[in-house]
Amino acid sequence: MNRYWFELKEGLLFSFKAIKANKARALLTTLGIVIGVCSVSLMSTAIKGIDRAFEEGIGALGADNLYIDKWPWFSHEEWWKIRNRRNLTIEDFERFKQMAKKPMALAPSLYSECKIQYQAQYIEESLITGTTADFLKTTNFEFSQGRFFSEVESSGGRNVAVIGSDVAKNLFGKVDPLDQYLRIDSIKFRVVGVLKKQGSNMLGNFNPDKQAYIPIGAAFKYFLNRWSTVTIVVRAANTSTIPATVEEAEEVMRRVRKLRYDQENDFSINQQEGLMNNYNSTVGVIKIVGLFITGLSLLVGAIGIMNIMFVSVKERTHEIGIRKAIGAKKRTILTQFLSEAALICLIGGLIGLLLAILLSQAVNKVLPTSVQVDTILLAIIISLLTGIISGFVPARTAARMDPVEALRYE
Amino acid sequence: MNMNIITLENISRIYEVGVEEVRALDGISLSIDKNEYVAIMGPSGSGKSTLMNLLGCLDTATSGTYLLNNNRVSSMSDNELADIRNQEIGFVFQTFNLLSRADALHNVELPLIYAGVGAAQRREIAKEALVKVGLGDRIRHKPNELSGGQRQRVAIARALVNNPTIILADEPTGNLDSKTGEDIMTLFSEIHQQGNTIILVTHEEYIAEHASRIIRLLDGKIEADERNGRFKERVP
C-alpha cells in the first residue's frame, strides 16, 4: 500500500513537471474541461435555486395546507362539469368550521384581481384576498411592519389592508406605507401591515409579495357578490396528520353540501402535494434535459483530454522506453499518465468551478441562488473522474509499450 | 551455488518477419563471472544488440535459460523483469538516453525513485554518484546544457546509483569524439577496478581492447570467446 502511495506521489510530481513544461497546451486542453465543469455546476446551481424558490414559496403559503375549493388544481374532469358545481358559500364555511375537528386553523378566502393605487402609483391587476383574521394562522407570514388585521376588524369588514413587499415597494417607494390610505378599485383602505419579502417567483400572482389582504366582509361589500365561490383554507396540525385531515374534510364537506351517498363530490380538496407533483413532473424533465446538454460539453472536454493524452504518449515514447529500461513497471507508467490526465482535469475543474461561482452571482440577480458545497464536491469528483476515464486508454497504451521498441523510437 | 553471475544456456531469439523467421541469436551458451570486464563484438546484424537486450532483461529469449545472479530470468513476469532491470542492471547507451526535461540530479535519481527510496536519501545517493563521475558541480544542469562526455557521465552515474550486479554499456563512446571516448573508457576501467562487472557492446577493436575478455558474435552464434592478452590492470 505504502508503495502505491509513493508511486502516486512521484507520478503526480512528474505530471506536475510535464504540465509545467507544456503550459500552453495544457491550458488549451483544459479549456474544454473548464467550460464543461462550469456549465454543469451552473446548471445544477440553477436547478437548486429553482427548487428552493419553489419550496420557499410553498412554505410561505403554509406547507401543510389544504384548499377546499370548487375548482380542482389538477383535473382530468371535463371543464363544464366542474363549472356546473355549486359555489362554496360563506355559510358552507361556517358549517364546516363547526363540524371539522382536525384542522389546526382554518379560514375562508375570496380572490379578486383589482387595481391598487396610491397617489400617482398604481398596479393594474393585483390579487386581492379577502379573508378573516384566522387566515394568518394558516400561513408562515412575517411582517416587516405592522400586523395582520384583527378579529374585530375582520368581523366588522373594516377598510384595512395588509400588503406584500412588492406592492409596498411599487406603490410607496420611499414613503412609509403604514397608516397610509391606498385605493383598491377606488375604495380607500388603510394599510395596517406590510409582509416581509418571501422572495419566490415560482407562484406567480399567488406570491404573497404581490398581494393585498383585506377583511372578507369588505371584499363582499365592495368587490364581490354573495355568490362568488369561497375557498376554505385548512391547515393540518403537521405533515403526518394531512391524510387524516383530508379524510375528515371530505366527510364533513359532503355533509355540509348535503350529498347523497351516490352523488359525486361537488368540491375539490387541493393539496400542496399536488402542486409539488405537478412541479416535479414538469421541471424534472427540464432538469434532466438541462444536465444532459451541459453534460455533453463535459464529454467534448473529455474527448479533448483523451486526444491530447494520446499525443503526449506518442511524443514521449522514447522517454517511456528510458523509464522502463531503468525499472519502471507497467503500473508505474500507468499511474504517471493517469495522474497527469487527472491533474489537468482537476486544474480545469477548479478553474471552471471558480468561473461558475463568479457567474452564479449574475444568476443570483434573477434567481436567488449560490454554488453549494455539494455542487463543489460533485464538480471536483466529476473532473477527476473525467481525467481518469479519458486518460485510461492512452495511459494503458503507454504502459504496454515494449521497452526495446520504445527505446528505438526517436 | 553457482559462482557465475550470468549463465546463458542454449539461448535463441527468433523474430518473425512476415512469414520468415530470423534467428537473431541461435543457441548461445556462455557464463560470466563476478567482476569480469567483457566486450561483445561483431559486425552489424551479428545479434549483439539482441544479446544486449536479453542480458539487460529488456527482451526475453524465445528458448533457452538465462540465470542472472541465480534468478531464472527466462521465466519472469514483466513486473519481475522491471525489478531486475532496476536492481541488477545499470544501462549505459550510445545515445545517453537521459530525460531531456530533467536535470542531471533528477536523471540519476530516477532508478532510486522506482526502487522506492525516499526523497532526502535518494538525493544524497544521487549526488554522491555524480561526484564520483566528476560532475559534482553540474548537478542542476539539464542534458542540453552538458557536453556529450558529460552527458555520458550522467548516464554512468545513473547506471551505478542502484549498485547493480552488472553494467551494460552499448557502444558508450559511439557518439563521442576519440579524446572524450578515451576518458569515458578510463572511467569504465576505474569502475571495473572497484569490483563491478561490466559488459561492453562495441564494434571498435580499440574500445574492446579495454576489456579482459572478448566475445565475438557472427550470425547469432559465438564465433570466438577469448581472454584479451593485451588487457592490463590500469592503476589510476
Image (tube, coloured by chain):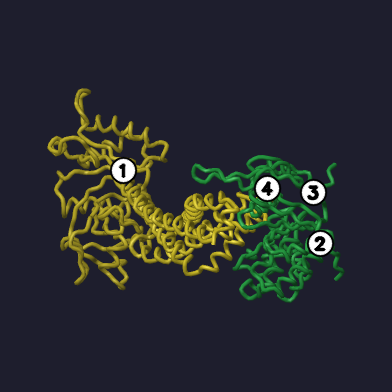
Distance Cα–Cα, label 2 vs label 3 = 15 Å
Frontmost residue, B27 versus A60: B27
Are there few (<14), some (14-19), or many (20+) residues within 10 Å of tag 1?
A: few
- Residue occupied by mark 2: B192
A98 left or right of B22? left
B116 left or right of A219? right
* Mark seen at residue B221: 4
Mark 1 belongs to which amino acid?
A: Ser
Chain (green): B
Q: From the image, which quarter does the C terminus of chain A lie in?
A: bottom right
Q: Do labels 3 and 1 share a chain?
A: no
- Residue occupied by mark 1: A281
Foreground mark, 4 or 1, reads 4
- Host chain of mark 1: A
Residue B158: % across, % down: 71, 63
Are there few (<14), some (14-19), or many (20+) residues within 10 Å of tag 3?
A: some
Frontmost residue, A50 versus A164: A50
Mark 3 belongs to which amino acid?
A: Ile
